[in-house]
Amino acid sequence: LGFSRGSASAMGTNGAGGDSDAKMASKIYDRSIRLWGKDSQQRIISAKVLVVGLRSLSAEICKNLVLAGIKHVSVADDTVVAPEDVGAHLFLREEHVGKSTRADATLPGLRELNAIDNTGIVVVKEDGLLTEDGLKGFQVVILTEGSRDRAAKTSALCRKLNIAFFYAQTHGLFGSFFLDLGETFQYTAEKKADPDDKKQEDTTMSSETTSYVPFSEAMAAPWGAINSKKVRVSPVFYALEVVYAARERLGRLPTEEDLVPLQEAKEGLTTEKGAKAGVFDDDLIQMVAAQAECELSAVCSIVGGLVSDQAIKAVSLREKPLRNYMVYDGRDGSGCVYFLSHDFTQ
């Protein structure tokens, strides 16, 4: 992300200590301000972000957002900490097991990252949260747990309320995330006056516009365009789709022992999506299913960094965000980005 680790504060803090806080903020965010300007950094600081689900991936996302300077981060996860939550998590400890919710146990660690002004880093209850009234006031919603049906409903609400929506997951060595920044997203980017002149260093600021599709539309897109456009698609994309389709059938993530649901999911996708013969790697599907509930700290750190980077672009309105779906393969550290729509492109 390019942010220095340290305590954060509002750039425009008023009242007692306001001048010293403002000076400290300018020092802390000096590199960010020089990178994309004071106005963009102020947008980052004043943004309001909701993160739902507080396992290892979302802990990494929250850490990055707070260190970037976002003062208002609401976290929601009513699940009581279990032993398996502790291993890869930045903030959970053995003493939290069976006693605290993931959100409550994560909060103190997040607040330590912004010791000057952390009152906006809070826990919110999940009950009634993913509703129109519950989401009002947020600029970004990041969902890291739950089915695609839940993601589709949340995405639709976010689009109605003009809220940037993210849906991110990791499964052992593998991960994926989707983002919808609305029908029209305007941002500012640096451009060379003469793109053909490789030696030219002078740049100008240009206002650009891009567009996104809702989660439900992206997931419903047929795969026929992949074949017709000869888009190179990572085999991890197909393996994850099988695992996610099996989850919709089972009501939970599959394991490597769920051979029948995985086979049925694969056959269903072949029919529904028009998948080309031979795109599914059965060994890889088994590998992803075996790791479906596993979290590895290194993969969570990488995918979490990518998600938070895109969230920062969404609130700062600087530089082009990716469109609109990414899969990550931790076996070789590769990532592929696709624009999932009825015109599937890479």
Image (cartoon, helix red, strand yellow):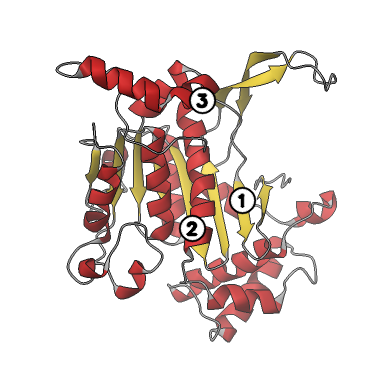
Question: Helix, strand, or loop for circle 1?
Answer: strand
Give residue 276's position: percent from left, percent from top: 79, 65
Residue in the image at 49% along x and 66% along y = 296
Q: Which residue is mark 3?
A: 317
Between discs 3 and 1, the one toward the N terminus: 3
Q: Is residue 199 above or below residue 98?
A: above
Q: Are marks 3 and 1 in contact (CB under 8 Å)?
A: no
Inter-mark Cα distance, 2 to 1:
14 Å
Q: Nearer the viewer, residue 132 or 100?
A: 100
Between discs 3 and 2, the one toward the N terminus: 2
Near mark 3 (Cα within 10 A), the count class, few <14, some 14-19 or many ≥20, is: many
Mark drawn on residue 81? none
Q: Is residue 271 above or below residue 49?
A: below
Q: Is residue 68 left or right of residue 185?
A: left
* Amino acid type, label 2: Cys
* Amino acid type, label 1: Met
Q: Nearer the viewer, mark 2 or mark 1?
A: 2
Q: Nearer the viewer, mark 3 or mark 2?
A: 2
Question: Helix, strand, or loop for circle 3?
Answer: loop
Inter-mark Cα distance, 3 to 1:
20 Å
* Amino acid type, label 3: Leu
Residue in the image at 72% along x and 71% along y = 280
Give residue 283's position: percent from left, percent from top: 69, 79
Q: Nearer the viewer, residue 175 or 147?
A: 175
Q: Which residue is mark 1?
A: 326
Near mark 1 (Cα within 10 A), the count class, few <14, some 14-19 or many ≥20, is: many
Near mark 2 (Cα within 10 A), the count class, few <14, some 14-19 or many ≥20, is: many
Q: Is residue 262 left or right of residue 294?
A: right
Q: Nearer the viewer, residue 70 or 314?
A: 70
Q: Which residue is mark 2?
A: 300
Q: Is residue 252 visible?
A: yes
